Image (spheres, rainbow, N blue to C red):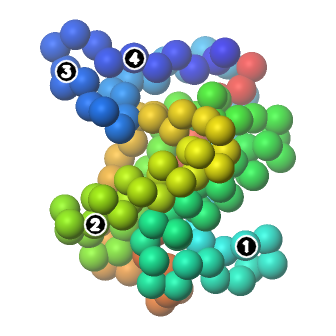
Amino acid sequence: MPVQLLNPEGLPRPEHYVQVAVATGSRTVHLSGQVARDADGNPVGPGDLAAQVAQAYSNVATALAAVGGTFDDVAKVTVYVVDWTPEKLADLGAGVARAAERLGVDLRKPITLLGVAALGEPDLLVEVEAVAVLA
């Protein structure tokens, strides 16, 4: 496996993500931000942050599979949430849990969560991008 995940001594040990990913593969894959759209470009989960998060993570999995990768190969995730407030954390977590269950994977990775004013289309609440390293 080209990505080793760890929480080093001296740093907090968060429940929902890890602090460090060490990647040793030979191919780096940068995915564009994935949003709540199905394969035909139709909106998924209008107004529902959890549903949109689940769809965005599922789209990341689809993109990874297209290049022979899985979430095991992901070294870093960045999540952009429109009008972020701490009250949205439960819905964000619910969406990640839903995607993890649907995909049968552990989605805890090093992550950066950024609150943004807007995304590319007005109905979008979240965008998820990832960097993966494949052997």
**Gap in angstroms between the C-alphas marked 1 and 3:** 38 Å
**Which residue is rendered at x = 37% and y = 28% of the image?**
18
Residue furthest toward the bottom?
Answer: 122
Q: Earlier in the sequence, mark 1 or mark 3?
A: 3
- Splitting the image into 4 quarters, where does residue 16 fall? top left
**Which residue is rendered at x = 36% and y = 64% of the image?**
91
Quadrant including the N terminus? top right
Disc 2: CA contacts within 10 A as few (<14), some (14-19) or many (>=20): some
Q: Earlier in the sequence, mark 4 or mark 2?
A: 4
Provide the secondary structure element on which disc 3 rests.
Answer: loop
- Splitting the image into 4 quarters, where does residue 82 fall? bottom left
Identify residue for label 2: 88
Identify residue for label 3: 11
Against 91, residue 40 (above or below) is: below
Q: Is residue 55 visible?
A: yes
Residue contact at pointers 4 and 2, CB within 8 angstroms: no
**Gap in angstroms between the C-alphas marked 4 and 2:** 26 Å
**Gap in angstroms between the C-alphas marked 1 and 4:** 33 Å
Disc 4: CA contacts within 10 A as few (<14), some (14-19) or many (>=20): some
Quadrant including the C terminus? top right
Residue 96 left/right relative to 100: left
**Gap in angstroms between the C-alphas marked 2 and 1:** 23 Å
Provide the secondary structure element on which disc 1 rests.
Answer: loop
Identify residue for label 4: 6
Identify residue for label 1: 38
Identify the amino acid type marked 4.
Leu
Image location (x, y in percent) of residue 60: 65, 52
Disc 3: CA contacts within 10 A as few (<14), some (14-19) or many (>=20): few
**Which residue is rendered at x = 79% and y = 71% of the image?**
39
**Which residue is rendered at x = 67% and y = 45% of the image?**
103
Image location (x, y in percent) of residue 72: 63, 28
